[in-house]
Image (tube, grey):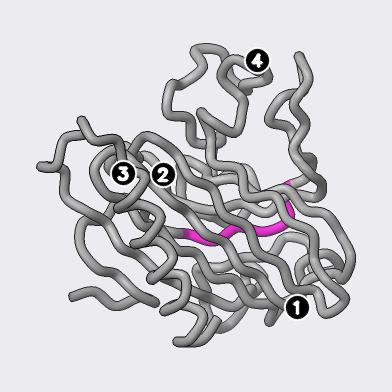
Amino acid sequence: MGTAAATAWAVASVAVMTSASPAGAQSGIRPVWLHTHGRFAPPKALIPSDALTYNQQMVPAGAGISVGEFAVRRSTLVSLRVEGLRPGHSYGAHVHSKPCGAVPEDSGPTYQDRPDPRQPSTDPFFANARNEVWLDFTTNDKGNGAAFSRQTWRFRPGGARSVVIHERRTATGPGEAGDAGERLACFTVMFERPGWYRAGGAR
């Protein structure tokens, strides 16, 4: 999660996005380049954190998280890196619509490019990895993991505000699509913030 990792992610992002963006996409949309990281803490910790854990057996206090976003034209790339979680476990992770709060439900529903009029959304037509940002990952023997998601759309400004880590990989079947179980932890991230933004500082 240090500078080297952030730089490598940034270089890869530029290479992928600038080469893969549709030729006919509008170039007037402002690009976004974001990298932010945090350390998980309980909601009532003495030192506040944007990264909250609701289950310290699965996401221990002090575990790390790093989220990146690179958006250009009509494409968005989101990255997730974690360290210090339970080793050898498969987690679900999604971008959610509201900031983290004292209780897991405060982060609202999973962000959808085309919102499902029926919530909670379990219809595979809406709850899928093309309409939502899924960042499921499996940790290694040190509890570290990573995931990437590329979409051919941009977040609505103010509409995507956090990344939530769930207890299991995301289901895809009818009536359960998008479900990944308990919300274990949450990291508040202000997606679609034009310009360069890193680790709580902007310029």
Camera-side residue: 191 or 75? 75
Residue 70, image x and y in percent? 36, 57
Please identify the residue farthest to the bottom as the structure is shown: 3
Q: What is the number of the mark on residue 158?
A: 3
Mark 4–mark 2 Cα distance, whole angstroms, equals 20 Å
Residue 112, image x and y in percent? 48, 30
Give the residue displayed 82% in from the left and 80% down from the top. Answer: 142
Magenta residues span 183-188
Q: Left or right: where does residue 12 sit relative to residue 179? A: left
Residue bearing mark 2: 160
Q: Give the number of marks.
A: 4
Residue 178, image x and y in percent? 68, 30
Camera-side residue: 37 or 88? 88
Residue bearing mark 4: 123
Disc 1 crowd, CA 10 A, few/some/many (<14, 14-19, 20+): many
Mark 4–mark 1 Cα distance, whole angstroms, equals 33 Å
Q: SS class of the residue under badge 4?
A: loop
Residue bearing mark 1: 84
